[in-house]
Image: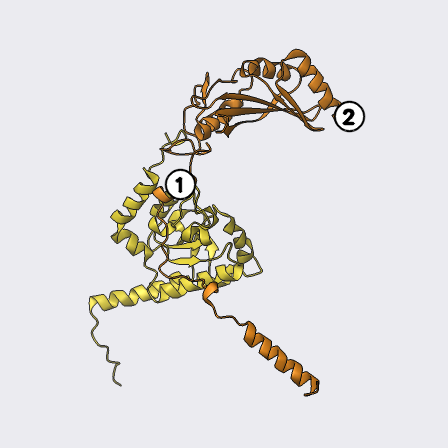
Amino acid sequence: MKSTKFSELSQEQVDRKWWEIGDFFRRNSLWMLMYCTGCCAIELPPAMTSAYDMERLGMGPMATPRQADILLVSGYLSLKTLRRLIYTYEQMSEPKYVVGLGSCTINGGIYHDSHAVINQLDQYVPVDVYVAGCMPNTEAVMNGFVDLMDAIKHKTANGWKKYRDNYDWYRQNQIASLGEVEVHDEFHE
Amino acid sequence: MMNSTNNALEVITLVESKYNVVKTEHISKYQVAFEVIREDIHSMLNFLKNSGWKQLSYLSAIDWPEEDKMELVYIVFNWDKGVHIQIRSKIDRENPEMDSILPIFPGCKYYEREAHEFFGIVFHGNPDSMKQLILEGWDDIPPLRKDFDPRAYSEAHFPQREYTETFIELNQQESKQEKRAARQAHIDEVRKGGKK
């Protein structure tokens, strides 16, 4: 009886195989850190409870940034919130994905001319999936998560790599809009 | 059961007998508004606090650029009578200054900080009034003044998404009205079986 012939794989190919296996498990157990700052957060209870039951996709809420895979930004972000969001995003362990809900994260939505609300989230942190709508309905939200799983499968959810490679560019944008990213207030000092 | 209408009227007679009120408004049976000169505000709030208006519900300001005035609004509430009293007073707009009411209502501390941040009013006697509260590192004129342009600020500070393609072109669509009319005529003809 002959043993099966294996062709020799390079280290790079082996790494890629392992990474694909990792991606399979990762996309079937996505844990979300929900940064519910905006009104789109109201779409999450039906998505999580028995009506649409997010858990059948392997998704669930997570309490701390270090254990979460997805940072879910639901809606508008004020300057003050953006500082905390950047803190949170940088605390998450890689690979990490960002999902932006609602038109506010895309182009400012109805807050496009506000002095306190930013207009484009992907200038400050990389966004992997946008779900458009004001607010998007629950099917759209669920569809966005399935899109993210597909993107992970096809290795196109590379936001965290982009953030690492273009850190200076993101930092520059953050400083241009925020002045200073570090939080200085009476509760932190 | 006490009658709230009488309560509001009682307040009006009580205050008008004691202070020189510029304008009195009986807004509803639970709300009364007085416009007074700024020198009267402290003694009036003190008097009202001793008469049962123990809660400072709100303190804010209104900007009147046409009159070149800033209007301070104090709202106090009486839990026994259920009557809100607004006390308003106009101050200078260019250098808005006011003495803090911290000795009378200690709860005004954060309202005064907020008013300083959003309208630029300086409250003398409140040690924290210049500290930032809501806006962090603000670098422009106070944002709730009427001469502040939020759109210009937003465009200057936050990148705007640029669209290279127009996604909605309703105006350039060809009209479907004629096709629709022809289809309807055909349906009618078939329905009648070719008869007129």
Q: Which mark is residue B3?
A: 2
Residue A122 x, y percent position in the rendering: 36, 52
Residue at the image position 58 percent from the left and 60 percent from the top? A51
Q: Which chain is yellow?
A: A
In the image, what residue type sits under mark 2? Asn
Using the image, name the chain to which the residue with label 1 belongs.
A
Query: Which quadrant of the rendered structure holds the C terminus of chain B?
Result: bottom right
Q: Which mark is residue A79?
A: 1
Q: Is residue B190 left or right of residue B88?
A: right
Instruction: Name the quadrant containing residue B104.
Output: top right
Q: Which chain is orange?
A: B
Q: Which mark is residue B70?
A: none
Please tell me if label 2 and label 1 are on a single chain.
no
Residue A147, above or below B130: below
Secondary element at tag 2: loop
* Colour scheme of the rendered structure: by chain
Residue B95, above or below A104: above
Identify the residue at the far front of this view. B196
Secondary element at tag 1: helix
Residue A104 x, y percent position in the rendering: 45, 50
Instruction: Name the quadrant containing residue B81.
Output: top right
